Image (spheres, helix red, strand yellow):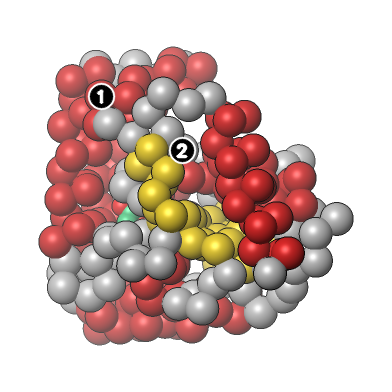
Amino acid sequence: MLKGISIAIDGPAAAGKSTIAKRIAQKLRYTYIDTGAMYRALTHKAIKSGINMDSDHDLSDLLEGTEILLVPNNGSQAVWIDGVDCSNEIRSEEVTAAVSKVAAHTTVRKLMVDKQRELANESGVVMDGRDIGTAVLPDADLKIFMTASVEERAERRFQENEKRGIYTPLERLKEDIEKRDRADSEREVSPLKKADDAILVDTTSMTIDEVVDKVIELAEVRLER
Ligand code: DC
């Protein structure tokens, strides 16, 4: 087993970050932290509570009174909000459509980043998101910026949805992904952006196993330094 390093995986929506990050964490016996799930959890609770999603103040207050737990579960990760398993709810279309707005607020991000750094304070961590290499863990040992063409990302999401019995037309998925990428890249606070020292991995024509092997190879090089 590799001794603990920190691996940051950033990239646009539906690029396969969490699938890859989970596998790597499992293989290396590292802690996996899905930061997108944390923004999704807050968005879900805000929708349920009728909170104004334009208000950084109201959302931050809500976040301070919310317990979000990322619980390892059979190689995956369950998300518990205030003691209730909301792993499926946070992936709903309604949450997906609103999460970029919630994640654009300054104080919300500051509170989230503090929590994420606390969680990363263990040896051996794989964290995925949009600003891990640039803001959350700027000193991460290995930074990956994972991307794929928007057509490929929409196709993967389509197949994933199909398995879960959800049918959303491919063209609609592509539009949603493009819209979310635009919002995440154009926001003022910690926008989605490749860190200067991140390694770009374009997964368009790669299998999951190929991507996992490549990242593990890169991690091994870091450990040998
Ligand atoms: O990775 P995901 O699709 O579950 O992330 C949901 C949203 O959360 C994404 O559109 C932008 C936001 N996010 C963020 O702003 N910063 C992160 N580190 C992770 C996610």
Residue 147 left/right relative to 209: left
User: Which amino acid type is shown beneath numbered disc 2?
Assistant: Gly
| 164 shown above or below 1 | above
| 184 shown above or below 214 | below
Viewer-nearest residue: 185 or 158: 185
Residue 48: where, in percent of width, then height?
36, 56
- Looking at marks 1 and 2 on the same chain, the residue that comes earlier in the sequence is marked by 2
Residue 6: where, in percent of width, then height?
62, 68
Residue 138: where, in percent of width, then height?
45, 77
Q: Quadrant of ligand 1?
A: bottom left
Residue 78 left/right relative to 39: right
Spatial distance from mark 1 to mark 2, Cα to Cα?
Answer: 13 Å
| Residue occupying the point 14% across, 61% down | 186
| Residue occupying the point 76% across, 41% down | 74
Instruction: Work out which quarter of the rendered image holds the C terminus and state it.
Output: bottom right
Disc 1 element = helix
**Dot 2 corresponds to which residue?**
16
**Dot 1 corresponds to which residue?**
151
Instruction: Work out which quarter of the rendered image holds the N terminus and state it.
Output: bottom right
Viewer-nearest residue: 6 or 199: 199
The reply to whether the residue tagged 1 has its Cβ within 8 angstroms of ligand 1 is no
Point out the residue furthest to the front here: 225
User: Which amino acid type is shown beneath numbered disc 1?
Assistant: Glu
